[in-house]
Image (cartoon, rainbow, N blue to C red):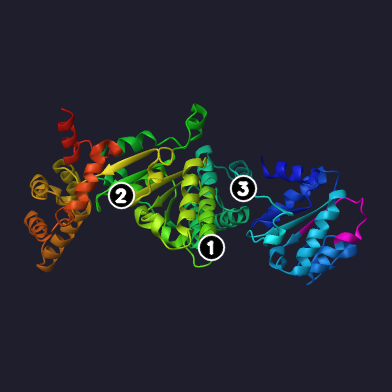
């Protein structure tokens, strides 16, 4: 049910006190006035702390700097006169015992009168003694159709036009912003070069970064990595490429649901984080990075509130990719944490959202220690798939060396013996291969020459890979994956070859 339909129903059902959490005062007030007009031309009275009541010449300024007097004004009107009263920022006064008592009295009185009080606030802050009389009504951010109408209006005002695809891209990039922010950023674009252009999508994305920074929970992460930057992991790449168009309207018409997400489990440095970035870039979606530690606050109820805020922001910016790095560290040892159950409540809210979300938020969670995660996290329905990312095979190491050297020395790639490098680096992860190349570059730079294959091999001989220092942990991970609990990200890896031999 849309906001307008629900608000209309509350007016007709004589819900006395309606609480609307929103930053978009102008937009929500316009919607309220329109619905009030449809309900027999109900007058609308607006109050704020600085200017008092506005809009009616006879009562202009009444209740200025006096929130209790603002409520007393309601009783001045005849009992049979319908009206809607909008009180801005009124959440700041709800803790006052006189105001709380007055609101409860009015709630009782309005059962027999066609009047409604609407409290506008940027956040939900309701004292316990008012929870039974206040009805919270969510006011969503502008939908795609509403944004498109506004963008088309601005385009018409400039006398220019945009192609259908560019218009759709611009509208999609604006989703998740308030209408005020959309107008502001598009006005900035028009002021810059006199019209809207395809490049203005970048301006909109920068505005989104500003919005996300203000939450201090999520980071808007620039994603420039491509699928081709990932060496190996062919099964995972194929899985991702098949879902490249799954966020389009064509996919909805086909009957496909939005992809839910995936979990990448495996050894450190094998490309899990790189994959998350490449997914966002390949699908042309914004990448949000969640540091789970930021969800936990010191005040009672703050952690749960931050979790709900994170979910609201992610859904508002959908379609998007939500990257949760090292999720195992946040929820390990869940039952033994002495935090009065805060971690359990945050975890419960999070996994419930994972299972029930219908918004196009694609969650990419990475984990190094799968044993530390609660079993509920791994249940089917939370993620579309769980992939195990193991150590690269010799062929995959060859692909990883090729990717890095193509970026570092594309002009003389043929001077490097990539086959030998792949052969001489068994048990090396992708991150360790990258570090080997950096060390080799230091060798060459210090001697005022370019680095060579021998420099890379010398660097590799000085590095002790994690596969040799954490043998037990890696073996446990491989045994967990070999038992069929996850899909292998690589077609040809040491573990996949071992599983094939077992099946034979």
Give the residue number, with chain letter if any, for mark 2: 371
Give the residue number, with chain letter if any, for mark 1: 302
Q: Which of marks 2 and 1 is nearer the N terminus?
A: 1
Indicate yes or no whether the magenta region holds residue 79. Answer: yes
Q: Where is residue 412 in the image (x, y as percent from the top left)?
A: 14, 51
Give the residue number, with chain letter if any, for mark 3: 142
Neighbours of disc 3 within 10 Å: few (<14), some (14-19), many (20+): some
Neighbours of disc 2 within 10 Å: few (<14), some (14-19), many (20+): some
Please tell me whether mark 3 or mark 1 is closer to you in this view: 1
Neighbours of disc 1 within 10 Å: few (<14), some (14-19), many (20+): some
User: Distance of mark 3 from mark 1, alpha carbons?
Assistant: 27 Å
Using the image, determine if residue 188 lies above or below residue 316: below
Please tell me whether mark 2 or mark 3 is closer to you in this view: 2
User: Which quadrant would the C terminus be assigned to in this image?
Assistant: top left
Q: What element carries label 2?
A: helix
Q: Is mark 3 on a helix, strand or loop?
A: loop
Q: What element carries label 1?
A: helix
């Amino acid at each position: 049910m849309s906001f307008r339909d629900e608000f209309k129903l509350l007016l007709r059902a004589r819900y006395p006190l309606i609480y609307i959490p929103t930053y978009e005062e102008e937009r929500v007030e316009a919607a309220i006035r329109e619905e009030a007009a449809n309900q027999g031309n109900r007058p609308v009275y607006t109050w704020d702390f600085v200017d008092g009541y506005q809009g009616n010449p006879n009562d202009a300024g009444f209740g200025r700097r006096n929130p209790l007097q603002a409520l007393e004004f309601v009783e001045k009107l005849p009992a049979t006169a319908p009206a809607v009263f909008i009180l801005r920022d009124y959440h700041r006064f709800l803790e006052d015992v006189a105001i709380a008592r007055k609101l409860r009295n009015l709630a009782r009185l309005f059962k027999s009168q066609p009047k409604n009080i609407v409290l506008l606030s940027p956040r939900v802050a309701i004292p316990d003694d008012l929870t039974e009389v206040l009805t919270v009504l969510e006011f969503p951010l502008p939908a795609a159709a509403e944004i498109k109408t506004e963008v088309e209006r601005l385009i018409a005002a400039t006398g220019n036009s945009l192609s259908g695809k560019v218009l759709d891209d611009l509208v999609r990039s604006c989703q998740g912003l308030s209408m005020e922010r959309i107008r502001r950023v598009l006005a900035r674009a028009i002021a810059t070069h006199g019209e809207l252009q395809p490049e203005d999508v970048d301006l909109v994305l920068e505005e989104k970064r500003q919005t996300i920074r203000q939450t201090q929970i999520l980071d808007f992460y620039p994603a420039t990595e491509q699928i081709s930057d990932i060496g190996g992991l062919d099964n995972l790449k194929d899985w991702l490429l098949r879902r490249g168009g799954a966020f389009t309207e064509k996919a909805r018409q086909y009957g496909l649901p939005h992809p839910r997400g995936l979990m990448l489990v495996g050894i450190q440095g094998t490309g899990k984080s790189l994959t998350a970035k490449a997914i966002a870039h390949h699908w042309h979606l914004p990448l949000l990075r969640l540091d789970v530690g930021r969800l936990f606050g010191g005040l009672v109820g703050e952690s749960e509130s931050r979790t709900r805020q994170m979910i609201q922001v992610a859904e508002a910016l959908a379609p998007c990719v939500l990257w949760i790095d090292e999720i195992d560290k946040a929820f390990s040892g869940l039952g033994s944490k002495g935090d009065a159950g805060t971690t359990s409540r945050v975890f419960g809210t999070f996994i419930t959202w994972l299972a029930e979300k219908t918004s196009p938020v694609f969650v990419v969670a990475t984990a190094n220690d799968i044993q530390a995660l609660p079993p509920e996290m791994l249940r089917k329905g939370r993620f579309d798939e769980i992939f195990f990312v193991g150590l690269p095979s010799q062929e995959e190491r060859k692909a990883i060396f090729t990717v890095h050297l193509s970026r570092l020395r594309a002009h003389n790639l043929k001077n490097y013996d990539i086959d030998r490098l792949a052969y001489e680096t068994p048990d090396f992860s992708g991150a360790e291969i990258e570090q080997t190349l950096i060390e080799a570059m230091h060798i060459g730079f210090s001697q005022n020459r370019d680095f060579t294959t021998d420099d890379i091999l010398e660097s590799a001989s000085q590095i002790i890979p994690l596969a040799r220092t954490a043998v037990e942990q890696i073996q446990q991970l491989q045994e967990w994956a070999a038992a069929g609990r996850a899909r292998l990200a690589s077609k040809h890896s040491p573990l996949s070859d071992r599983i094939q031999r077992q099946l034979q």
